[in-house]
Amino acid sequence: MATFNQERVEHALNELLVRIVPEDPSEDESAANQRFEAAFDFAIDELSVAGQPSVVPDINHIASLIERRVTRANDGAQQTARFHNLFSRLVSQPVLEQKWRMLYFLLQLSDLPPATDQPAPRDPRARTREPTTPSKHTSAGAQMHESPAFREAFAKPGLSQLPVNDGSPRASPRPAPEADKPEKRKERRSQETSKEQATDTEQHKALAGPTEPSLLRDLPFTLQGLSSKNLVFPSSTALKLPATLPVPLVSLLHTLAEPSLLYRGLAEFVESTEGGLVGQSFRSALGKELRSYLGLVATLEGQIRRALSQLDEAQPHNGIGKAGVTLKRCVIWTREATMGLRLMSLMVEESKGKKGGQLISLIHSFSLSHGDPYVGAFAERLLSHVTRPFYDMLRQWIYDGELADPFGEFFVSEQSEDDIREANGQEGKGGATSVWEDKYKLNEKMIPTIITEEFANKVFLIGKTLNFIRYGCGDAAWVDTYSKEASKELHYGDTANLEQSIGDAYKTTMARLIDLMANKFKLFEHLQALKKYLLLGAGDFIAVLMESLSSNLDRPANTQYRHTLTAQLEHAVRNSNAQFDSQDVLRRLDSRMLELSHGEIGWDVFTLEYKIDAPVDVIVTPFGSKQYLKVFNFLWRVKRVEFALGSTWRRCMTGARGVLGTVSDKVGSDWKKARCAIAEMVHFVNQLQYYILFEVIESSWTELQEALNKPESTLDDLIQAHAKYLTSITRKGLLGSQSTDFTGQLHELLKTMLAYKDAVDGLYSFSVAEFTRRQEHAAKIETRTAAGRWGLSEKDSLDSPDPFGPKRSSRADPDSPFPPPLLKIGDDNSSEDDVLPALRKRLATLVVDFRARITVLLGDLVHQPDHDMRWLAMVMNFNDVYQPVRRRRKVDKKREREKETPQPTTAIKTAGGERA
Amino acid sequence: MASQLPAASQEVKRKAAREVIDILHEIATLLNTHLDRQQLSYCVSLIENGANPEALANVIRKLREDFAQGSSEEGEEEEAVAR
């Protein structure tokens, strides 16, 4: 009832009405008064009747309602801010008692378009995406329920009015008489919900929506996702509940709606056929689970039917409670199934876009890391089913070496030619190497978590090997027999067995491959042959070859003919131990000419070659062959210098006993110097050669042998060992290091030595010429003496002047019939005069140059980190003849070279004295 | 009565009241209620004295409707008003 101060109210109302009711001048007094009276009465009645306002008396709530109303107006933001401001000021005012009523009044009177009627409430339970807690999930189907009471209860704006007591057992907080309310309602209520509520309460007395038995009857159909009379599925993700149900029934039906909607979605998914093999097996596993769910529904249906047949119409709720089957009971019975369905739909959601190994990993993660044992068991059940195609693929891969993967689900993928070429840049690796290395690729992402990384690597290797054996080595027969006898069924969950089979397969295939390599393709023989021929291991063969080729190769490069080279090669083979090698090896040995450029002689373009073909070239890659050739080139040069120096030395030594002895007065000192220098050079070359052939090559070879003969080695191990072998040879053999340029230095040294050899040859020919001259001279004297003349005369000195004596002007000779020549051009004398000093100078410079270079080389060698190279330095300089010089900066380099003076020893004292 | 203190407090009260009316008037304008100051103050007093705000709002709305239809149909209005 209205509890207001009658008097005051009347007065205020009067005043208000005066202002509201507009004055109409045309109207006469009485009419206006009448109108006024009428309005007044109306107002009074209204106010008496009204009673308490029906809003929750919370000012904040009102404020938010107002705010919402304001926000929806046109320039809402600014107005909202203003309203906030005003509201805060209002709240701080002490005057008004019932601010909320005032605000509510204003809200009611407001002209702004009201907020649109409450939108269908969104799923109040938000979906979480954590895969580890699927029980928090809810179905997508909670969206569509059209029961207005429900909507109201969960309405976003909050309760717009306190709930009406409609006969449900819950007592409403509303005081005061309710019974007469329905009658006293007027149409002038502005709330639709109250209207509905009126109809609700009206209907409630008559019919509580579809009865529970009818709902129960429909339930089995609903649970299968089929529309029924009361519960309709308007779409595949929504279930429409009848509009006239009381709220508790509605909530029960919501719980029951969840499995039905889930089932519908899952049934759709299971029917779809996309995705690879694993996806299909996943679908079939889900289908199995769904079938068991349907079994549950069938049992439920049986129960319901039995119960319904026992219904007693008279009792309240039609005696359902006694019959034992109610909606509530169904909810409980379907709870576990609902969890399973939830889990399945979660998996389906997560699995979109994944395939093969990833899918298996997903399901496996559920079984591994989830806390709920139900989930774990469920996932395990699924896994054994889902992984069957995976295991089939695995089996085929490890026993046949074939990849049967139409949908790209396995973690080994085949790369096409283009991919390989792309990966390798422009130049492919070619040959069998590319087959081994690149044809198959291990796809890390697709490795399912049911197998470990190491396991996956093993599997990859096994398959690759089998494939390689089949295609690269041409041994398909063995692969087939092996697969027939060893292949067995692989299962999930059988980890011990699986590991065993994989281990066995691994061992067998690897052993077979190594066996093939060794025996069928004679890998080790080839490596040995490479060492013998390209790395100059077979000394006798190389010596013969060099002897026969040396004269040939001195000629310019463009006069070399391939057939001559081949013929010489044959000759060398026949005359050395190489003839006892197998035909296969000898067939691959060949001599070749490198590309020649202008001015080169044969020595620069000659090379041996050893042909390698598949599958051995997996190990001796084309890059490796190039390295072999590089080393051969270097060694060949060194050998050549050794050979040249050796032949010169021989000539000198034999000549010293004969020819050279006679001219030792003139050229003896030169010869001594030359011999010393040659000895130095020979020593250097020998040490270098010994170092490379024995310290470097042989030791690396033993390491390689060890690696090759290891019992558990795989092809990858072999490839690695061989690569290591070659790199250590190139590095330690002074060919490969980047910081110091050994190769350049060595080449310069070798060139110097060859030049020196030429100079010595020149000296030799000079000595021989001198010797013949003296012979002739002596012979002439003999003949002249025999003829009774003077042995020697002045004329003779003119004719054959002493080339070492000072130049005598021929003018002083009165006997000479010829006028003294003014110039001595083209004169033998002068040339002979010049030759020896020129020779001497040349020899001297060369020796100095040689020594300088040696010291620089030693300096570099001594500071190398590798102890073998330091050993080389020590051995070259064993009597400290040279002072190793450290090349620091380019500026200092020249100064160093000038500064250094090798310490003189007794052996070369004279040479030291002679040096300019 | 008519001593300093009550006068001051009266003054304060009046000021406060005025302020409140101001605020309420602004809110009313914001909400487009078409109430002027005078009307608003009478409404305030009505509600303070216990009137139901909903009812009052309805009354005002109805009256506005009726009288907005124009005074030419005064007869019909009267009937409508008299229900």
Image: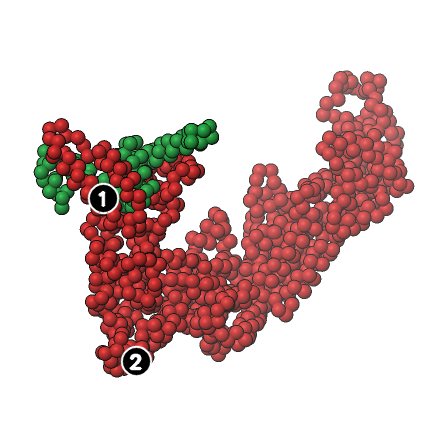
Residue B25 pos. (x, y %): 33, 33
Chain designation of label 2: A
Amino acid type of the residue tagged 2 in the rendering: Ala
- In this view, A235 is above or below A912: below
Q: Which image quadrant: the C terminus of chain A?
A: top right
Q: Is residue A534 left or right of residue A765?
A: left
Figure colour of chain B: green
Residue placed most toward the observer, A802 or A202: A202
Q: Is residue A273 left or right of residue A893?
A: left
Mark 1 lies on residue: A44
Residue A856 pos. (x, y %): 76, 39
**How packed is label 2: few (under 14 Cα within 10 Å), some, or many (20 or more)?**
some
Figure colour of chain A: red
Q: Is residue A916 left or right of residue B57?
A: right
- In this view, A530 is above or below A10: below
* Residue A269 visible in image: no
